[in-house]
């Protein structure tokens, strides 16, 4: 019996660990997809794959919803009020719901185009370690430039549609491993002159639809193809990613209230160079 149970327990432990990595790296601007690809490689584990990585993102999505639950409740009410009042900007919550909707359009569009016209994308060179390393270094440079050249003075009420469209197109690039959804949206927000903490909150909130939908689609796909016993490790990963995400969101918002993002710039540079040096 132990010979049967032991490998399965190991798989669950790995999923638990990968869930923690997912939660921590989803909200720090360092790319969860890259870390879920790179860390198993250096531990000698099998690549968890796109479906597993996307599925455990659900834990992160639920964590955002839980952390901002009071604000999200108001945002949802405001979104449906638009259909009655036909006013997309009548208050801050209506404005935010409109921004979330607009910012989600590019990433959904690009995702559908890739699904339709690039079916082998998950096996392409874009998911290779060398590509992830170069992307990490490039994104580190972009984040540093946004810190240097962004004036970081805009509060939420000063954000305009142009800023949101720019943020939405930036978010769509997160489909490519190594970019980091939170990193690229934070970078875009800083380039737009939005102050750091507001930029981080906006980055988290606009990511809810994309993270939730991609996670749900992949989880449903896995439920159709795997047995119940094979699904359990994924559930373990989702749960651990939820708790580590809560920790990461709270820590990152408190950190940005007093600090810049250069520690993540340095981390991404070292991360990318380390990958290249060890290939």
Image (tube, rainbow, N blue to C red):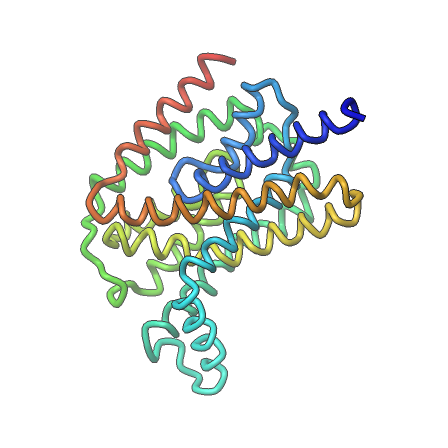
The structure residue drawn at horizontal position 67% and vertical position 39%, both measured from the top left corner, is: 233
Furthest residue in direction front, as rendered: 1
The structure residue drawn at horizontal position 48% and vertical position 42%, both measured from the top left corner, is: 23
Residue 163 lies, in percent from the top left, at 33, 58
Residue 220 vs residue 228, the one in the foreground: 228
Above or below 189: residue 101:
below
Furthest residue in direction bottom, as rendered: 84
The structure residue drawn at horizontal position 26% and vertical position 67%, both measured from the top left corner, is: 157
Q: Does residue 184 appear in the picture of this structure? A: no
Residue 250 lies, in percent from the top left, at 35, 49
The structure residue drawn at horizontal position 52% and vertical position 58%, both measured from the top left corner, is: 209
Residue 259 lies, in percent from the top left, at 21, 41
Residue 274 vs residue 2, the one in the foreground: 2
Q: Is residue 162 left or right of residue 127?
A: left
Above or below 140: residue 224:
below
Furthest residue in direction top, as rendered: 278
- Image quarter in which the N terminus is found: top right
Residue 138 vs residue 19, the one in the foreground: 19
Above or below 167: residue 234:
above
Above or below 122: residue 66:
below
Q: Does residue 209 appear in the picture of this structure? A: yes
Residue 7 lies, in percent from the top left, at 72, 25
Residue 52: name its quadrant. Answer: top right
């Amino acid at each position: 019996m132990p010979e049967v149970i032991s490998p399965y327990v190991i798989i669950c432990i790995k999923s638990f660990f990968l869930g923690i990595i997912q939660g921590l790296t989803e909200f720090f601007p360092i790319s969860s997809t890259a870390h879920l690809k790179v860390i198993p490689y250096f531990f000698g584990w099998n690549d968890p794959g796109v479906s597993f990585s996307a599925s455990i993102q659900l834990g992160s999505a639920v964590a955002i919803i839980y952390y901002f639950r009071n604000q999200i409740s108001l945002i949802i009410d405001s979104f449906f009020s638009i259909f009655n009042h036909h006013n997309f900007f009548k208050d801050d919550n209506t404005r935010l719901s409109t921004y979330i909707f607009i910012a989600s359009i590019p990433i959904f569009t690009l995702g559908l185009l890739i699904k339709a016209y690039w079916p082998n994308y998950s096996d392409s060179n874009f998911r290779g370690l060398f590509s992830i390393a170069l992307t990490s270094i490039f994104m580190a440079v972009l984040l540093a430039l946004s810190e240097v050249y962004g004036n970081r003075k805009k509060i939420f009420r000063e954000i305009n549609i142009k800023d949101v469209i720019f943020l939405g197109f930036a978010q769509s690039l997160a489909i490519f491993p190594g970019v980091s959804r939170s990193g690229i949206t934070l970078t875009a927000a800083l380039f737009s002159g939005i102050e750091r903490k507001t930029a981080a909150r906006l980055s988290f909130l606009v990511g809810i639809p994309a993270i939730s939908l991609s996670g749900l689609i992949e989880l449903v796909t896995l439920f159709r193809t795997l047995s119940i016993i094979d699904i359990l490790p994924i559930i373990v990963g989702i749960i651990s990613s939820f708790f580590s995400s809560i920790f990461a969101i709270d820590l990152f918002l408190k950190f940005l209230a007093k600090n810049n993002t250069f520690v993540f710039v340095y981390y991404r540079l070292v991360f990318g160079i380390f990958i290249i040096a060890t290939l």
